[in-house]
């Protein structure tokens, strides 16, 4: 893996009316002609994502969106909806507006919306070569305003410096093993190779955990579940932590000593990407699911499904055996609206390795708003295989939460 995954990049969304100069600004930021530029309104349709490195900000996904005033027809409304979804997961927003014309009512409304979201935001006044009108000089109080001319490059250096200053004000994801191991300790990873494993490579949580082990100056051992006993007994130092794939929980838990700290890739990503406490609390509400209830399995990526697929086969089988046999399951990649969510009784999320923490927290916020409990793959499989509270022992707060609720 040579490139930073999109899920680990900050998201910079370029947002504004049609023909405000968004695509030209995107090209200037990327220093290439990545986005199509035209005087014709609505040139940018779906959000276009470009990857780049931006100094102290690190790896960034730059998102060029369709104009939020594109309501001429049904297709335009769909474009606006997709742009709004990108805005919901943004870490930084560049609000692009022509500096030579007064703000429209829609722009005033959009600025208020951004202010309520409390996102790092810069107002970029384009067409600076035509001069700035007085109304735009006073536009969007509280947001820094930077005048830019996309043709000559005027103001782009100032914009770049302003973006760098956001580096210390952005909530960044923790690393997979943050606070769980110390330098010099040994970490053992158990990574099954079965039909669902990608050929000739490893899944993203495994790759990121391996890199984190190296960054933390720890020693690593890695094996499949079939070689676990020999590998464990052959280690010079007892592992500070064992991390396994969720689907091998039962076998790994039975092989290791009962006092060996053990968790899963999915559980450490539940903490890294979302709210581990919320997912743990969801497990304690499984007995509230009614007869004939509806369960939503919520994934964040699309993949070819095998006969033993975790989301459509393994989890439903365990659920019907251990919770209720008469529930129905649905699988979605995009989380429904709170109104639609209210029709479900429980939601089981994937590990979220392909989305950003902000996106996963948005999903959790929608679940809370709809008052629908939920958990994630790793926690549910640990529960289903009788490995809770053991798999939560590395996380004292959530371990106590689960034990307290289960008493």
Image (spheres, rainbow, N blue to C red):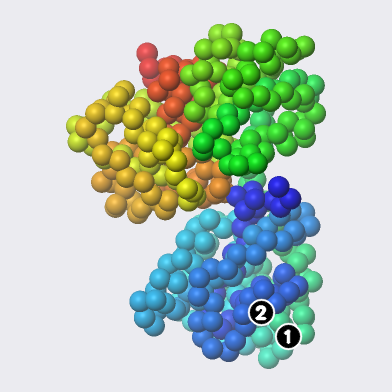
Residue drawn at 66 percent across, 79 percent down = 24
Residue 237 rendering spot, x and y as whole percentages: 75, 12
Displayed quadrant of residue 101: bottom right
For label 1, the SS is loop
Mark identifier at residue 167: none
Instruction: Give whichever of 92, 280 is nearer the camera.
Output: 280
- Vertical side of 384 occupied by 14: above or below: below
Residue drawn at 42 percent across, 77 percent down = 76
Residue 61 rendering spot, x and y as whole percentages: 64, 60
Instruction: Give whichever of 283, 314 is nearer the camera.
Output: 314
* Mark 2 / mark 1, whichever is N-terminal: 2
- Vertical side of 335 occupied by 14: above or below: below
| Residue 34 in sight | yes
Specify few, some or many for label 1: CA neighbours under 10 Å numbering under 14, 14-19, or 20 or more.
few
Residue 8 rendering spot, x and y as whole percentages: 64, 48
Residue drawn at 58 percent across, 42 percent down = 198
Q: Which residue is mark 2?
A: 24
Displayed quadrant of residue 51: bottom right
- Is 257 left, or right, of 289 in this rendering? right
- Is 299 left, or right, of 180 in this rendering? left
Mark identifier at residue 151: 1
Q: Spatial distance from mark 2 to mark 1, Cα to Cα?
A: 8 Å
Number of disc labels: 2
Q: Quadrant of the C terminus?
A: top left
Specify few, some or many for label 2: CA neighbours under 10 Å numbering under 14, 14-19, or 20 or more.
many
Tag 2 near tag 1, CB within 8 Å: yes
Residue 301 rendering spot, x and y as whole percentages: 49, 50
Residue drawn at 67 percent across, 38 percent down = 207
Displayed quadrant of residue 299: top left
- Vertical side of 380 occupied by 166: above or below: below
């Amino acid at each position: 893996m040579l490139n930073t995954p999109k899920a680990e990049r900050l998201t910079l969304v370029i947002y504004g009316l049609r023909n405000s100069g968004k695509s030209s600004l995107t090209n200037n930021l990327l220093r290439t002609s990545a986005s199509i530029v035209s005087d014709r309104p609505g040139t940018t349709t779906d959000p276009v994502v470009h990857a780049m490195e931006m100094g102290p900000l690190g790896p960034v996904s730059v998102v060029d969106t369709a104009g939020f005033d594109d309501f001429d027809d049904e297709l335009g409304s769909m474009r606006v909806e997709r742009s709004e979804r990108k805005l919901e997961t943004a870490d930084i927003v560049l609000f692009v507006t022509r500096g030579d014309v007064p703000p429209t009512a829609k722009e005033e409304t959009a600025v208020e919306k951004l202010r309520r979201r409390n996102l790092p935001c810069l107002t970029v006044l384009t067409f600076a070569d035509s001069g700035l009108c007085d109304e735009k000089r006073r536009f969007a109080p509280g947001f820094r305003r930077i005048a830019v001319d996309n043709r000559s490059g005027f103001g782009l250096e100032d914009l770049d410096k302003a973006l760098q200053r956001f580096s210390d004000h952005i909530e960044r994801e923790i690393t997979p093993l943050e606070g769980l191991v110390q330098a010099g300790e040994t970490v053992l990873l158990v990574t099954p190779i079965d039909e669902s494993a990608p050929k000739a490579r490893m899944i993203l949580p495994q790759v990121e955990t391996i890199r984190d082990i190296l960054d933390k100056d720890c020693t690593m051992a890695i094996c499949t579940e079939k070689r676990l006993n020999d590998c464990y007994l052959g280690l010079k130092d007892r592992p500070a932590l064992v991390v396994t794939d969720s689907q091998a929980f039962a076998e790994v838990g039975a092989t290791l000593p009962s006092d060996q700290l053990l968790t899963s890739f999915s559980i450490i990503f539940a903490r890294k990407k979302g709210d581990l406490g919320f997912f743990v609390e969801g497990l304690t509400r499984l007995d509230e699911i009614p007869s004939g209830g509806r369960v939503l399995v919520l994934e964040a990526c699309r993949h070819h499904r095998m006969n033993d697929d975790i989301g459509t086969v393994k989890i439903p089988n365990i659920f019907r055996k251990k919770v209720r046999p008469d529930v129905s399951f649905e699988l979605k990649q995009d989380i429904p609206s709170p109104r639609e969510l209210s029709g479900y009784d429980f939601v089981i999320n994937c590990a979220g390795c392909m989305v950003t923490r902000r996106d996963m927290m948005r999903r959790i916020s929608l679940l809370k708003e709809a008052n629908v409990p939920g958990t994630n793959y790793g926690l549910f499989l640990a529960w289903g295989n009788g490995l809770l509270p053991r798999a939560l022992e590395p996380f004292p707060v959530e371990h106590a939460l689960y034990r307290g609720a289960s008493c």
